[in-house]
Each structure stands twice: as C-alpha cells, then as structure tokens.
C-alpha cells in the first residue's frame, strides 16, 4: 500500500502542475480548483506513504519522478521543448534517486 500511496501522490502532483499551467495564473476557476484539489490530495497521499517509507526515500522518489513526469507532460501536452542541458539535468536527478535508493543505507 505504501508505494500505491506514493504513486498516487506523484500522479496527483503532476496533474496539479499541469492544471497550474492551464489556470493562467489562477485566473480560471476550474483549472485552479483542480490544481488545488490535486495538490492537497497529493500531500495527503504523500503523508500516508510517509507512515511506512522513510522521508528521505519517499521525498526523493516523489520529487524526482514528479520532475520527470512533469517535464514529459510539458513536452507532450504543452508542446514545450527540452534542450540538452535540461535532459542532462533530469537524468542527474533520476541518477541521484536511483543511487540513494539502491546504494545508500540512509534511505532504508
């Protein structure tokens, strides 16, 4: 269940970020409402995941996958381009999450 909660937190955070863009500075009430519900729900599910997953591990996964998926949404949905430095930076973030989770004793 703990990783299901974490996955829901990530999906809701990415959803909220997409609707934040669509809200046009919170000037549109429906996207703004969806953004708020998604973010509140994301933090709720993250808090449930934190009951069983160490904070450092859960937050690294939540933030890392959130960045990768949000970048993917920006490319696919909003037709934004990622240049090579952005792709390399995202790869470093993913590498850091992998290293932390598989090699660090701190994360367990």
Image (cartoon, grey):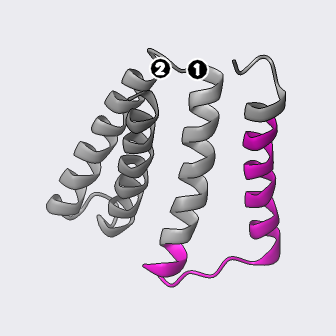
* Up/down of 8 relative to 32, above or below: above
Magenta region, residue range: 74-99
Q: Magenta span: helix, strand or loop, mainly?
A: helix
Q: Are marks 1 and 2 in contact (CB under 8 Å)?
A: yes
Picture quadrant where residue 77 is located: bottom left
Query: On the picture, is 32 further left or further right than 58?
Result: left
Q: Which of marks 1 and 2 is nearer the N terminus?
A: 2
Badge 2 marks a residue whose secondary structure is loop
Which residue does the numbered mark 1 point to in the structure image? 55
Q: Which of 7 and 56 is in front in this view?
A: 7
Q: CA gap, disc 1 to disc 2?
A: 6 Å
The residue sitting at the front extreme is: 1
* Up/down of 35 relative to 75, above or below: above
Which residue does the numbered mark 2 point to in the structure image? 50
Residue beneath the point at 39% across and 65% down: 21
Picture quadrant where residue 37 is located: top left
**Which quadrant is home to the N terminus?**
top left
């Amino acid at each position: 269940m703990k990783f299901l909660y974490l996955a829901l937190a990530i999906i809701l955070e990415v959803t909220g970020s997409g609707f934040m863009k669509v809200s046009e500075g919170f000037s549109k009430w429906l996207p703004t409402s969806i953004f708020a519900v998604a973010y509140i729900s994301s933090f709720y599910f993250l808090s449930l995941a934190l009951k069983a997953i160490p904070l450092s591990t859960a937050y690294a996964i939540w933030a890392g996958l959130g960045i990768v998926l949000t970048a993917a949404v920006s490319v696919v949905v909003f037709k934004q381009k990622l240049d090579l430095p952005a792709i390399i930076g995202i790869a470093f973030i993913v590498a850091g999450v992998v290293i932390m989770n598989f090699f660090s004793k701190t994360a367990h």
